[in-house]
């Protein structure tokens, strides 16, 4: 509004400076000149906005005229000399009313009356009521308009903010629902291009992870509780047996060498059972520590053969067989001697070598020669390309533990006398060596194959000592295989049963695995080499 007021004052000042230079007093006063003296009498003219005051040269106020009766008169100065008029010039200045209710804009200039001996000062005042009224009206209008704009902006802003952050309300509601324990809630109406949409996506991912973690925790807790019950029962049973035999002996119920031997045998068996369970628990605890394992090149064939021999010794009524390569099967030797100039071709390598040697035979000549030297003075061994052998990078003791556990499971969960096969091989494509244990029992149903390697899980939830295990055997196998960067899978055995296949990374570096390819200490027969003729 300051700019509007200044513009209005500028217009008033311009009107004053233009009017003060005119003879406005002649239109508002009846001027009579007598003896060089001028007299001013207010004329009965129509009301005007201008008010005029006339001063003599010495500064005395002579007359005042103009204006409106309803308009308050300005408080003109009592004296205003001609010198001050020259000093002020026509520059406008402010002047108030006598009662202070009105403001005027005033300009003064020299008034020359024809016939008068001296000059007079003409002071013209113009009220600022109209300017103030205009500014006030504009202030009112702009105030109302500003309030209306502010109100509309506030309503619009609230609507936009509510619309933009409506998703946050959903986030709040979902968070409150989750806080009450319902973790199945998820954020909907996601706009990926907005911050709220990305927030919802992040919250959904977080909720999925929390839900999975809680599910795993609940499953682990349930398995742990079940295992604690089973383990406590398994540990309590041999302790009760030992305690019972001790009480019987103390009470004298056991007498004689035969009964004492029988009691000691039962105590020993129960102690062995309890020791095996404790060893399984300790093995799992050590595996959980995830210590570094020193790996080396390990031949799977003697491990499988030794395991088959051990299983056959433990269960003589079972047919435990092993099918695999011998340690020297990868190396084939062919010998070419002087008595056999055209050896039997066993491959492109020997054939090519033979042709190369024949091309070196000297051409026939007519000159007499001594006895021709023999074509070959000694046998020349030729080595064929080696076949892949199951030499893997692993820890031999742990691999033997894995195979022993798998064989123990096969004996425990298959009928008496059913055969068990062990086999080894190489997956050339994936550069892995594998060893498989196949049985001919009931097999492993498809729906539980993902659970049998879980810790504390047993297919038979009963606590019978005869058939139920502790639920740790296969979990130990899985932990050991994982620590050795290997893998294990379960498939159906042709004709019925289950086949557990364990694979480990191959020792692909022949220079590294070479010393292990033909160890004389390994209990496997060597492939006989071709003898010289």
Image (tube, rainbow, N blue to C red):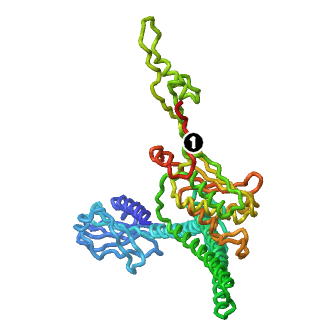
Relative to 142, 497 lies left or right = right
Specify the farthest residue to the top: 366
Q: Secondary structure at mark 1?
A: loop
**Relative image position of residue 327 (x, y in whole percent):** 55, 46
Picture coordinates of residue 521 (x, y %)? 50, 52
Residue 68 spot, x, y in % from top left: 46, 72
Q: How many labels were placed on the picture?
A: 1
**At x 68% / y 84%, what residue is drawn?**
259
Q: Residue at x 72, y 73 (%)?
A: 466
Q: In the image, is 23 to the left or to the right of 196?
A: left
Q: In the rendered view, does 266 fall on the left or right side of 161?
A: right
Q: Is residue 278 above or below residue 477?
A: below
Specify the quadrant of the image occupied by residue 190: bottom right
For label 1, the residue is 527
User: Which sits in the foreground, 435 or 322?
Assistant: 322
Give the quadrant of residue 124.
Answer: bottom left
Instruction: Work out which quarter of the rendered image holds the C terminus and state it.
Output: top right
Q: Nearer the viewer, residue 205 or 45?
A: 205
- Where does the image place residue 361, in percent across and percent down from the top left? 47, 16
Query: Closer to the camera, 527 or 260?
Result: 260
Residue 175 in view, yes or no: yes
Q: Nearer the viewer, residue 213 or 166?
A: 213
Can I make out residue 165 in this image? no
Which corner quadrant holds the N terminus?
A: bottom left
Residue 292 horizontal side relative to residue 424, left or right: left
């Amino acid at each position: 509004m300051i700019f509007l007021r200044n513009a209005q004052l500028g217009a008033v000042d311009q009107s004053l400076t233009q009017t003060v230079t005119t003879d406005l007093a002649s239109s508002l006063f009846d001027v009579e000149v007598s003896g060089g003296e001028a007299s001013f009498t207010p004329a009965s003219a129509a009301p005007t906005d201008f008010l005029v005051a006339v001063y003599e040269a010495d500064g005395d106020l002579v007359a005042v005229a103009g204006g409106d009766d309803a308009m308050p008169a300005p408080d003109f100065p009592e004296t205003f000399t001609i010198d001050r008029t020259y000093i002020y010039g026509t520059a406008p200045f402010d002047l108030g009313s006598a009662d202070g209710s009105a403001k005027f804009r005033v300009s003064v200039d020299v008034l020359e009356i024809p016939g008068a001996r001296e000059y007079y000062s003409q002071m013209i005042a113009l009220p600022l009521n109209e300017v103030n009224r205009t500014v006030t009206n504009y202030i009112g209008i702009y105030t109302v308009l500003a309030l209306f704009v502010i109100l509309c902006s506030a309503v619009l802003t609230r609507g936009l903010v509510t619309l933009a952050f409506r998703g946050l309300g959903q986030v709040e509601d979902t968070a409150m629902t989750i806080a009450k324990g319902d973790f199945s809630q998820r954020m909907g109406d996601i706009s990926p291009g907005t911050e709220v949409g990305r927030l919802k996506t992040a919250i959904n991912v977080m909720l999925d992870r929390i839900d999975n973690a809680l599910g795993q925790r609940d499953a682990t807790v349930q398995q742990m509780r079940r295992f604690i019950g089973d383990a406590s029962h398994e540990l309590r049973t041999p302790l009760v047996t030992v305690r019972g035999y001790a009480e019987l002996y103390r009470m004298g119920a056991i007498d004689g060498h035969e009964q004492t031997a029988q009691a000691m045998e039962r105590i020993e068996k129960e102690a062995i059972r309890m020791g095996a369970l404790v060893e399984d628990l300790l093995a799992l605890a050590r595996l959980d520590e995830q210590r570094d394992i020193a790996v080396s090149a390990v031949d799977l064939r003697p491990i499988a053969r030794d395991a088959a021999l051990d299983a056959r010794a433990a269960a003589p009524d079972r047919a435990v067989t092993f099918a695999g390569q011998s340690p020297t099967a990868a190396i084939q030797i062919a010998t070419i001697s002087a008595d056999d100039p055209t050896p039997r071709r066993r491959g492109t390598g020997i054939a090519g070598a033979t042709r190369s040697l024949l091309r070196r035979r000297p051409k026939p000549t007519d000159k007499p020669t001594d006895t021709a030297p023999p074509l070959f003075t000694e046998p020349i061994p030729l080595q064929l390309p080696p076949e892949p052998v199951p030499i893997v990078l692993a820890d031999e003791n742990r691999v033997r533990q894995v195979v022993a556990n798998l064989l123990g499971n096969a004996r425990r969960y298959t009928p008496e006398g059913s055969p068990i096969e062990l086999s080894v091989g190489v997956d050339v494509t994936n550069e892995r060596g594998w060893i498989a244990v196949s049985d001919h029992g009931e097999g492993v149903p498809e729906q539980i194959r993902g659970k049998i390697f879980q810790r504390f899980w047993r297919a038979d939830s009963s606590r019978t000592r005869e058939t139920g295990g502790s639920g740790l055997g296969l979990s130990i196998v899985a932990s050991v295989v994982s620590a050795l960067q290997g893998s294990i899978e379960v498939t159906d055995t042709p004709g019925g049963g289950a086949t557990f296949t364990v694979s480990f990374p191959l020792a692909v570096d022949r220079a590294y695995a070479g010393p292990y390819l033909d160890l004389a200490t390994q209990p496997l027969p060597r492939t006989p080499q071709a003898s010289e003729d």
